[in-house]
Amino acid sequence: MSVQDDIAVLIRQEAELVLPEFSPELAWRLGTTLRELSLQRGLPLVIDVRRFGSPHQQLFYCALNGTTPDNQRWVARKVAVVARFHKSSYHVGRLLEQDGLSFSARYGLPEEDYAAHGGCFPLQTAAAGIVGAVTVSGLPQREDHNLVVEALCLLTGQNYATLRLPE
């Protein structure tokens, strides 16, 4: 799939995967859904669900077997991208790839603080807009992204087969 095709799907995902509300209970359901998917598939993931604000409020966190402290650092860097740009971290990365630019060259921001790699998705409600982020780290970036989309589809009743990025 071309970068442009991916970007079109990413835009659609971000427009359609809107939550009815966002609460600690919903964050817990989203986090446990990702955890169960990960355990069923034997995936080594760090899972993070948080509400934006100053400071961010972490509502769910889990580090499964096979992860390292580096995965936690990747989560923080991906969250920084979503918090700043209100797009999925994979979407920002694909836009940079389309333009042939690195993150630091395009935005002048330190790559040690930002990671435009798949796995972090903005949490949006119809009433309030972008309110937080859900993040996973541990798989190749496209797989990280698709796993988050799968969990959001399960939570919102959307059809994952029509919203996922092809392999």
Image (tube, grey):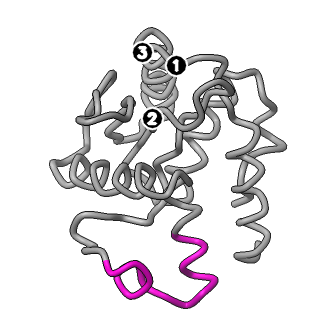
The tag earlier along the polypeptide, 1 or 3, is: 1
Residue in the image at 45% along x and 32% along y: 38
Residue 138 visible in rendering: yes
Residue 11 versus residue 61: which sits nearer the camera? Answer: 11
Quarter of the image where the C terminus is located: bottom right
Residue at point 69%, 56% (across, down): 10
Asked if the magenta segment contains residue 95, the reply would be yes
Q: Quadrant of residue 7?
A: bottom right
What distance separates the C-alpha of mark 3 from that of mark 2? 13 Å
Residue nearer the viewer, 140 or 84:
84
Instruction: Give the SS element for disc 2.
Output: strand
- On the image, numbered disc 1 is attached to which residue? 22
The relative height of residue 33 versus residue 122 in the rendered view (above or below) is: above
Question: What crowding class fits label 1: few (fewer than 14 Cα within 10 Å), some (14-19), or many (20 or more)?
Answer: some
Query: What type of secondary structure mainly makes up the magenta span?
Result: helix
Q: Which disc, if any, is residue 28?
A: 3
Location of residue 99 with respect to 78 vertically, above or below: below
Q: Nearer the viewer, mark 1 or mark 3?
A: 1
Residue carrying label 2: 132
